Amino acid sequence: MMTIEEYRAAILQALLDAKNEDGTPALSEKEATEALNGFTDDELQDGILWNTPQDVADIILEG
């Protein structure tokens, strides 16, 4: 199983890899980091068993 640090890093990478329809980044690094920082380690720990990093990134991008 991933550590919280690895999980957080994988989510951040998924956010940074996300592209808009025109191929531009969906979020800047600052925006992605700020969005991810909205989740506490405890919140991420609760979801780590059920949600892949991509799932969490998708939730953030949809929000």
Image: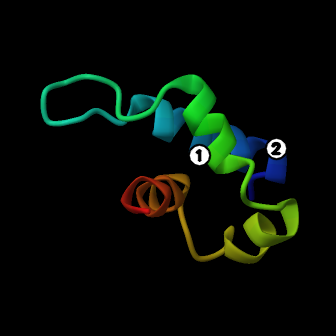
Secondary structure type for disc 1: helix
Relative to 29, 48 lies left or right: right
x and y, in percent, of residue 46 in the image: 76, 77
Residue at the location (28% across, 32% down)?
19
Of labels 2 and 1, earlier in sequence is 2
| Mark identifier at residue 5 | 2
Of the residues shown, which amino acid type is indicated by label 2? Glu
Rounded to the nearest whole Å, what is the CA distance between mark 2 and mark 1?
A: 10 Å
Residue 12 quadrant: top right
Q: Nearer the viewer, residue 4 or 16?
A: 16
| Mark identifier at residue 20 | none
Relative to 45, 33 lies left or right: left
Q: Which residue is mark 1?
A: 11
Quadrant of the image containing the N terminus: bottom right
Residue 51 quadrant: bottom right
Of the residues shown, which amino acid type is indicated by label 1? Ile
Q: Residues within 10 Å of mark 1 (few under 14, many from 20)?
A: many
Residue at the location (57% across, 25% down)?
29
Q: Nearer the viewer, residue 45 or 22?
A: 22
Relative to 27, 22 lies left or right: left
Residue at the location (74% across, 60% down)?
39
Residue at the location (82% across, 61% down)?
40
x and y, in percent, of residue 58 in the image: 41, 57
Secondary structure type for disc 2: helix
